[in-house]
Amino acid sequence: MRLSVLQEKLAKGLSIVSRAVENRPTLPVLGNVLLATEDARLRLSATNLELSITTWIGAKVEREGAITLPSRTLVDLVNNLSNERVDLTLDPATQTVNVRCGATTSNIKGIEAAEFPVIPLGGDADVAVPGRIFKEMINQTVFAAAKEDNRPILTGVYMQFDGNVMTMAAADGYRLAVRTTEIEQHFARPVDMVVPARALSEIGRIIGDEDEVVTITLPTDRAIVLFHMKQTDVATQLLEGKFPDFSAIIPRSYVTSTVMYTSDLLAACKRAEIFARDSAFSATILVKPAAGPGEPGAVRIAGRSAERGDNEGLLDASVEGEALNISFNIRYLIEVLNVINDDQVVFESNGPANPGVIRPKDRDDFVHVIMPMSLNR
């Protein structure tokens, strides 16, 4: 194998695929990145056997070949090379790659490509989603997936294709995020799966151009789903088990409905969070309806610390219904507000012992449900 690539492109490609490499791989070859020539391109692949990422970069190939090289060594070296052409030459006898860039020469010992696991590639696309929309759907759901694997199914994001609607949902037992969008494809019968949140997070990072389209190859005989982007493929194993019926969790009515500006509410929550840290991030939201016709309602957000003090923020709001005094984990509110790009949000509740609902004011494709915290905490 002998080829030349630009340092900038090689560094970017390695930054994409190396995120699939485990810090402590079970097999030495799983700590490596596969480099393989394909026509006038270099294919970079990495896997932890559950998640696989492959990306292609342009290259001048003089001699075909393939090799796997230690991920950390290769990434650190390439990131510290000058921004010019990088020449890679493989010595098949020693499985060593000579890396030459400007006045710098390095030799990296690798493991032959035959020992690298087979990476799922190709497949006909079953669904196509604009990259911008898919990235937004990922951002608005993955943060609500469980971080601990006490219930492994909740560490994933539920995806369903029904008719011409695609739904993504994530829950961790304390909150639920649901996002929908219309797709061009039509499914006569619902198709669903649970994709690891980590895999979707990586896809969200990879999606680039505004006009990029993400195509999805749904699983067949193997429980693997493939996501195809412009120059990158991500394959991941699906999670086994049944995702909870989240539709029953979403309240269908409310006794208090409040409209606020997203940026104002987010800023008030961030200030309250500074003091709520000492009380398990519990902050209080007090909603007060308008005192009379033509007057605004008000929302007071308070975070308190017995040792450090307190903070209260007062926001003008449009309030319908009853007054409300409720407590939430303020971090959960901050995380959902961070992914709502709309100017205004609606907060709805059926009382302090019931879940609260956050959604954009002028859209019905995203809803977030948060369980309240005890007022006694």
Image (cartoon, grey):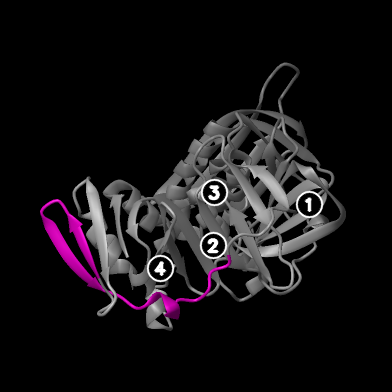
Of residues 172 and 84, the one drawn nearer to the viewer in this rendering: 84
| Residue marked by disc 2 | 198
Q: Quadrant of the N terminus?
A: bottom left
Give the distance between the C-alpha atoms of the residues marked 1 and 4, in whole angstroms.
45 Å
Which element carries disc 1, helix, strand or loop? loop
**Nearer the camera: disc 4 or disc 3:** 4
Q: Residue at x 40, y 63 (%)?
A: 18
- Cβ–Cβ under 8 Å for marks 3 and 2: no
Give the distance between the C-alpha atoms of the residues marked 3 and 2, in whole angstroms.
17 Å
| Residue marked by disc 1 | 250
- Would residue 216 appear left or right of 210 to someone viewing this image? right
What's the magenta region? 97-120
- Cβ–Cβ under 8 Å for marks 4 and 3: no
The quadrant in which residue 196 appears is bottom right
Give the distance between the C-alpha atoms of the residues marked 3 and 1, in whole angstroms.
19 Å
- Whether residue 176 appears in magenta in the rendering, the answer is no
- Would residue 95 appear left or right of 202 to someone viewing this image? left
Residue 6 at least partly seen: yes
Amino acid type at mark 2: Arg
| Residue marked by disc 3 | 335
| Residue marked by disc 4 | 34
* Sequence-wise first label, 1 or 4: 4
Q: Give the x, y percent position of residue 352.
A: 71, 51
* Sequence-wise first label, 3 or 2: 2
Q: Residues within 10 Å of mark 1 (few under 14, many from 20)?
A: some
- Cβ–Cβ under 8 Å for marks 1 and 4: no
**Nearer the camera: disc 2 or disc 4:** 4
Of residues 376 and 276, the one drawn nearer to the viewer in this rendering: 276
